[in-house]
Image (tube, grey):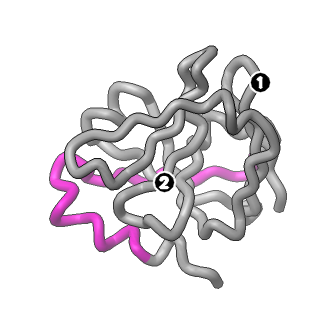
Amino acid sequence: MIYQGSCHCGEVRFQVEAPEVIEADKCNCSICAKSGYLHLIVPNSKFKLLSGEEQLLTYTFNTNVAQHYFCKHCGIKPYYVPRSNPDGVDININCIDTPIPKLKISDFDGQDWESHAHKLAYKSKET
């Protein structure tokens, strides 16, 4: 399926190709827990930024590998390039505007990221 998404104010719009049944991850690391981010990691080829690239600001921390993109108007982070999958894009499920027929959410222990990151590596690979 092709899902449409956006930030809160609509300045940043994107589309992502994902299955009808989406399996998302709920991470308990500090940035995800505080922002309520729900993860859908896809290969770069499944993501397309439709508009608003010039409206994005980038935030990095710790190793500065992950690139967190925020709308400079409304402050919402619709997607980012994760450290675990630098060859992919991590979509915020909460920013998908298209109704999701079925959503399965699994917990991910991001507080112990170094021990668990390898469990995410396959998600950005082409299938």
- Residue type at the position of mark 1: Gly
Residue 58 lies in magenta, yes or no?
A: no
Q: Which residue is mark 1?
A: 10
Q: Mark 1, residues whose alpha carbon is within 10 Å: few (<14), some, or many (≥20)?
A: some
Q: Give the vertical position of 124 relative to 73 (above or below).
A: below
Which residues fall within the magenta stretch?
100-121
63 on left or right of 84:
left
Which quadrant does the C terminus fall into? bottom right
Image point (60%, 37%), residue name: 78
72 on left or right of 86:
right
Q: Which residue is mark 2?
A: 81
Question: Residue 30 in the image: x percent, y percent?
Answer: 26, 34
Q: Give the vertical position of 21 relative to 45 (above or below).
A: above
**SS for callout 2:** strand
Task: Return the residue nearer the eye: 75 or 25.
Answer: 75
37 on left or right of 11:
left
N-terminal-most mark, 1 or 2: 1
